[in-house]
Image (cartoon, rainbow, N blue to C red):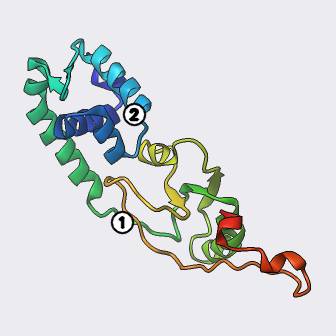
Amino acid sequence: MNINDLDLNLLRYFLMVMEEGTISRAAQRLGLTQPALSRAMARLRTAIGDPLFIRTAKGMRPTARALSLFAPIQVAVGQLDQALRTAIHFDPQESKRRFRLMATDYVEWLLMPDLIEQSQKEAPHISFDLIPTEGDFFARLESGEADLLIGQFSQLPGSLKSTRLWQDEYICLAHRDNPAIHQWNLQSFA
């Protein structure tokens, strides 16, 4: 097996399945669907040439090969994670980076004009690509397809970090003579 042909995310997925013991729990923690994680694990099995896990009534039992790979992969992924988390100097005045943002239409409308104006002042050479929030956007973020995801989310995978940017309040307006106004309630809009 050539390491250049291996998607390194597969190693993280392998570790999560080892820790959780089931594809469904591992997928939930990773923010992936169960079929997406199953496909990813199939790619890893093909690359390594071993089934890695045997399905049992209680979940996934690791093969001898999986057990022998667990500790070295855990150490390697931990070291890689630590190396990537080390602070990198970012000079906004000199950076020519293109940031890939996933955001809803509402967030684009609300945030992008100010973000572009501010970035032109403080980071004149950076640019933005806007990516629609469709499909498995957490997996797209984790895979590096996008740099940032801006929106409203009730649950996040443990592998992602979040920061509250603002709090918003939704209201509904209608003319006071509208006959339907007395019939509307929260369930009408849900």
Amino acid type at image mark 1: His
115 or 71: nearer the viewer: 71
| Residue 127 in the image, given as x and y percentages of width and height | 62, 59
Give residue 34's mark.
2
Dot 2 and dot 1 residues touching (CB under 8 Å): no
Residue lying at the far bottom of the rendered structure: 176
> Split into 4 quadrants, where in the image is the C terminus?
bottom right
Q: CA distance from mark 2 to mark 1?
A: 38 Å
Which mark sits nearer the N-terminus, 2 or 1?
2
Q: Quadrant of residue 9?
A: top left
Amino acid type at image mark 2: Gln
Q: Residues within 10 Å of mark 1 (few under 14, many from 20)?
A: few
Please indicate whether residue 153 sits to the left or right of residue 84 in the image.
right
> Split into 4 quadrants, where in the image is the N terminus?
top left
Q: Residues within 10 Å of mark 2 (few under 14, many from 20)?
A: some
Mark 2 vs mark 1, foreground winner is 2
Residue 168 against residue 154 in the figure, above or below: below
Give residue 89's mark.
1
Please indicate whether residue 16 sits to the left or right of residue 93 in the image.
left
Residue lying at the far top of the rendered structure: 49
Q: Secondary structure at mark 2?
A: helix
| Residue 188 in the image, given as x and y percentages of width and height | 71, 66
